[in-house]
Image (cartoon, helix red, strand yellow):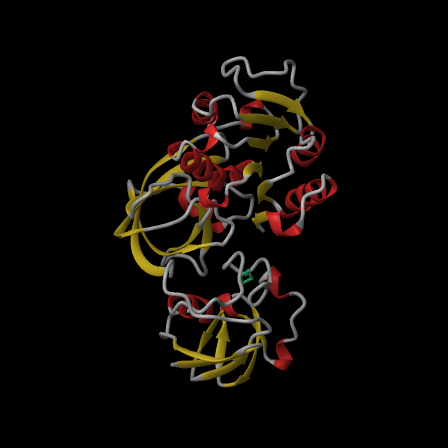
Amino acid sequence: MKISVQSKNGEHSFDCGGRETILHAGLREGLTLPYECATGTCGTCRARVVGGEYEVLWKEAPGGKRLKPEKGDILMCQTRPLSDCSLMVPSELKVVQSGRPAKRAGTIRNIKPLTKDVAHFDLHLSEPMQFEAGQFIVVETPDLVGGRAYSMVNFTASPSDHIQLVLKQKADGKFSDWLFGDRKAEEAVTVFGPLGRAVFRPSEDKDIICIAGGSGIAGMMSILEHAVQADYFRNHKGTVFFGVRTHQDTFYLAPLADFVSRSHGNLEVTIALSHEESVSEVHQQYPNLKLATGMVHEVAKNGLGDRGENAIAYIAGPPPMVDGAIRALLGSGMTVGSIRYDKFG
Ligand code: FES
């Protein structure tokens, strides 16, 4: 089926297969359609259908709250065409050649609990994928409707068929129930990616600030891995605030401590405990990691000082935490253009 898109700077068209969403098909063709989460929560991929038939996959998607479906408003990440369609997208678009996402088969293996509600898992891909530190993929399973977004934890400079991901179990999370439940040693899934524009590129030549809540640390691990591999901290500062509820909810402390030890003294990592008093200023087992008490965005606000000058900030976590962290960073003098974030709905 053919999708025609009228944008602020002209018309574009691309083919969309019967099972593809309009967003996936357009991105696969290199069109820079607007999106953030790719899974129905943020509302960034809104468009208006002005001709053609379509079906909406997740009618209650939180990202669609402000849309007017009676006027043809859709979330492109939640819409599949049933015929050729024409849509209007309120953005300027272009076609890019590099970094186009694609669909691959994947196999989930080695699911390892990290805390009582966070698990690490490996994903083996049918074909290698090149991704940038900070990017994510959408994972789909035939057993469940819709996809779930996961940031890559690892980083490799060349295309890789092995990626590492982190899963947080949610009270009403069908996907996490599916994965945390009584599963086989391997699970077959479909993977679409890489996605996401909140990426780290050493050529930007700026200090790094990372503020993460819970499993939001995943993409920061990839960014730090890339920075350490590139010896980036020889000439740049890094400041990480990692928020969890209590000591028992911490994970990835060993690799974080390893990154600090390889940073020439230029990387500082603070673990912020929101529901437990930190009895010491440093972690007992990993003394090169600092400890603090409070919500992570508050701890970041108090601890940033003038570190926002000449820095790029990466934020990932639940929406209220991300909003609080953005306010803290703007209050410390950073500009909107130097703040990159992922909100997990
Ligand atoms: Fe579609 Fe976020 S990209 S709702």
Give the residue at x 53% y 14%.
Answer: 287
Q: Answer with left or right where residue 120 lies relative to residue 322.
A: left
Q: Is residue 141 above or below residue 283?
A: below
Q: Residue furthest right?
A: 331
For the N terminus, the image quarter is bottom left
Against 287, residue 34 (above or below) is below
Q: Residue 264 at x, y = what percent?
A: 47, 22
| Residue under the point 59% across and 40% down | 311
Asked if residue 21 lies left or right of residue 70, the reply is left
Give the left or right position of residue 128, taking residue 132 as reference. left
Q: x, y (%) of residue 331?
A: 74, 41
Image quarter for residue 16? bottom left
Residue at left offset 45%, top offset 48% = 150
Residue ID at (68%, 32%): 306
Q: Is 169 above or below relative to 283? A: below
- Residue 142 appears left or right of 11: left
Ligand 1 in which quarter: bottom right
Nearer to me, 202 or 220: 202
The one nearer the camera, 220 or 64, is 220
Q: Position of residue 32 (x, y in %)?
A: 47, 66
